[in-house]
Structures are given as C-alpha cells and as structure tokens.
Amino acid sequence: MKTCLVIGGGGFLGRHIVEKLLEKGYGVHVFDIRRTFEDKQVEFFVGDLCKKEDLLPAMKDVDTVFHCATPSPLSNNKQLFHAVNYHGTKTILEAAQEAGVQRLVLTSSASVVYEGKDIVNGKEDLPYASKPMDYYTETKILQEKLVLDADSEDFFTVAIRPHGIFGPRDPHMLPTTARMAKAGKTKFIIGDGKNTVDFTYVENVVHGHILAAEHLEKDSVVRGKAYNITNDDPIYFWEFMRRIITGLGYPAPKYNLPYWLVVALAVILQFVCKILKPIKEIRPTFTPMTVALAGTHHFYSCERAKNDMDYKPVVPMDKAIKLAIDSYPELRAET
Ligand SMILES: NC(=O)C1=CN([C@@H]2O[C@H](COP(=O)(O)OP(=O)(O)OC[C@H]3O[C@@H](n4cnc5c(N)ncnc54)[C@H](O)[C@@H]3O)[C@@H](O)[C@H]2O)C=CC1
Ligand SMILES: CC(C)CCC[C@@H](C)[C@H]1CC[C@H]2C3=C(CC[C@]12C)[C@@]1(C)CCC(=O)C[C@@H]1CC3
C-alpha cells in the first residue's frame, strides 16, 4: 500500500485523518512539532515544518502529503502565522518536490472568502477576502494560493475548505463553549439568532480529504482546485450552540443582544487590548471575527465536491452533535 505523511497529524483533524488512513490500509507517517500519541502502526517524526531538514526524513518514500498543521486559529500572533502558514507551506512544497512526493492535499478553510459579511451558499469561485479579519485568515489565503499554484505535471495539489469542524478531541468549539457556559457567559444570543452557518463533523472532513487524495491523478479535474467540504446541512448558529450548551447540561442562551452593539463592543475591546499589549497580553474570546461568525450567515455549497469526487457527508448533523457531546464527559456541567 502507498505511504502518506500527515503534517499536523498530532492535532485534532490530523489525527482523525491518520486513524482513517490506517483503517484503509495505508502506511502512515506523522510530522508534528509535538508528540501527542503513540501508535506502533505510525512512524512519528517530531519537528518544525518551517525547517526543510526536519521535513525531508518524514517524506522519504511518501506518495501523498496531507498538510493540516496550523497555529491555533484563535491566536493573534501575526509573526507566527506568517512563519508557519505561509513560509512553512513554501518549505513543505519545496521539500515534497525534492523528496519525489506525487500529491499534496492542503487543509485550507472556507473562511478564506469570509470578511464578516453574509455568505449564502457560497461557491469556491467567490473572491478571496480582500480585507481578511485576522492573521489566521490572511495567511490561510496566502497558503492556499501557494499550494494551488504549485500543481504541475509531476506534482498534483488540491485544497480542501472545511468550515467549523467539531467532533471528538476538538480543541476549540466544544471546550471554548463549555468554558464560557461554566462562567455564565452563554446567556446571550448575538443578533436575532436566525443566522445560518455550516458546522462540519470531523469524519466528514476526513472523508473529503481522502476522497480528494484518491482522485488526485494526472488527468483529474480536481488538480489545482479548492473544494468546500461541510455537513451539507446548514443550521442556525444559535440552534447549534443551544444544542451543544444544553447537551452539556447548561441552560440555553435566551436574551438577544443587537448585533451592531456586540460588534462595537468587540472593536473597542480589541483596541483596548492593543493599547495594553506592552503591559499585559489579553486574548478575548469575542474578537470582531468571532462576533461576526456568531451573527452573520456563512454557509457554503458542496456541489463541486459532489460532482468532481462524489462527496457525500458520512455522518449526519443529529448524530454528529450527539457523538461530539458524548465524547466530552469532562465538559459536562456538574450536577
Ligand atoms: N478547527 C476548525 O474549525 C477548522 C480548521 N481548519 C484547518 O484545519 C487544519 C487542522 O486544524 P485543527 O486540527 O483544528 O488544529 P490543531 O491545532 O488541532 O492541529 C494543528 C497541528 O499542527 C501542529 N503544528 C503547528 N505548528 C507546527 C509546526 N511549526 N510544525 C509542525 N507542526 C505544527 C500542532 O502541533 C497541531 O498538532 C488547519 O489547517 C486549520 O486551518 C479549517 C477550517 C475549520
Ligand atoms: C458564542 C459562544 C457561545 C461559543 C463560541 C464558539 C467559538 C469558539 C467557535 C464558533 C465558530 C467557530 C469557528 C472557528 C473557531 C471556533 C469558533 C469561533 C474557526 C475560526 C476555526 C478556523 C477556521 O478555519 C474557521 C472556523 C469558523 C468557525
């Protein structure tokens, strides 16, 4: 069987990709800056993706690279995002071609086209955000362009754009929501609560990645293209949150706050944090980006993935929410 390398394979999505590849009989190498698990079936390489000399040994005899490493999307470290997501991705592309890798699947993000305004059934041909709302989005755009431009006669690339990934071992969605609920900060709904968004169960994201890799052949239409991958079942942001919050045993949010008011507060808070930065680094959960995500429509069409690679979500939303909540007994409210 062919060997795959999962860069960022120690993280949330990466480790789920690793598990599915093993289940399908592929050989698996993992490359990550930290060792997060042990598995005799996996060859684990600890290193920094910004260093070609760290990457090359992990790429030996590898046919396909999955690149799903990133600094935390909720961080605000401009220098780190540029170093890892942009320069690091350039290094990965150079190393892969030097090592004779044939394919590379990038985990991009549907938010490369999002700049705080409503997106309704957005297709992949929407222009990239001209004013990205944070350094994460800014560098995901640069990264995706690099990868898609690198597609060539003997090196095939594709980018997968998931949105709002959740599931077992998710480091953001459920843990952040539970932390806020525990602190009594989930009483409010931002806006009228009727904004529709995509949340995507991790297994569906994995399925999209592996399908893309398996379609990445010389004459394939998927080469050099980006694909939205979601649950294909948009839901009100606040209905999804209500189900998570109550599923964890906390009371449902019930008071509505005007969207414009929360945006204004987030902008002021961001300004105050900037001024205080030399004295104390504060990272609020509510940034202009997170408020926009909680108060606007942002859902995406999966038609291109359905047509070009026969994508269909494998886990429906109701089951996905239950599986995610059940996987986090430690986040439940104490009774
Ligand atoms: N979580 C979400 O809702 C979404 C995530 N994505 C994308 O999915 C991918 C995976 O994200 P998650 O699994 O959620 O994040 P994660 O934080 O769980 O995993 C990222 C992994 O990258 C590793 N990493 C970071 N810097 C590194 C470096 N310099 N060298 C080697 N490894 C390094 C980390 O140690 C971590 O294990 C990312 O590309 C992210 O942009 C896209 C859309 C939504
Ligand atoms: C409002 C509260 C009750 C709950 C806050 C939940 C947030 C932590 C998450 C809601 C939407 C999420 C999201 C991402 C991170 C976590 C949330 C802000 C991403 C920014 C992760 C990286 C991406 O590529 C896009 C995601 C969009 C949705």
Image (cartoon, rainbow, N blue to C red):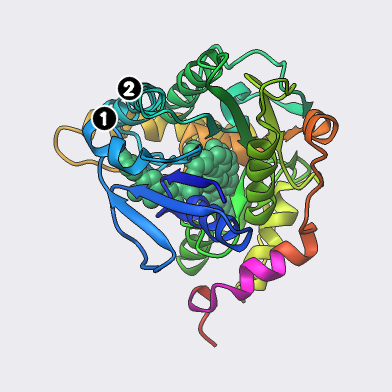
Instruction: Judge left or right: residue 95 versus residue 321.
Output: left
- Residue drawn 29% across and 41% down? 57
Magenta includes 323? Answer: yes
Spatial distance from mark 1 to mark 2, Cα to Cα? 11 Å
Residue 116: x and y, percent?
60, 26
Q: Which residue is mark 1?
A: 52
Quadrant assignment for the C terminus: bottom right
Magenta includes 194? Answer: no
Residue 226: x and y, percent?
65, 25
* Residue furthest to the left: 279
The number of numbered badges drawn on the structure is: 2
- Residue drawn 71% across and 26% down? 118
Up the image or down, 277 lies above or below 147; here it is below
Whether residue 283 is visible: no
Whether residues under marks 1 and 2 lie with C-beta atoms below 8 angstroms apart, the answer is: no
Numbered disc in front, either 1 or 2: 1
Q: Which residue is mark 2?
A: 87
Amino acid carrying label 2: it is His
Whether residue 214 is visible: yes
Amino acid carrying label 1: it is Lys
- Residue drawn 80% across and 58% down? 316
Residue 148: x and y, percent?
56, 18
- Residue drawn 14% across and 37% down? 279
Snapshot quadrant of residue 167: bottom right
Dominant secondary structure, magenta? helix
Judging depth in this view, the residue of 61 and 151 nearest the camera is: 61
* Residue furthest to the bottom: 335
Up the image or down, 334 lies above or below 304; here it is below
Judging depth in this view, the residue of 182 and 12 nearest the camera is: 12
Magenta segment: 321-330
Instruction: Judge left or right: residue 153 versus residue 39.
Output: right
Instruction: Judge left or right: residue 154 versus residue 100.
Output: right
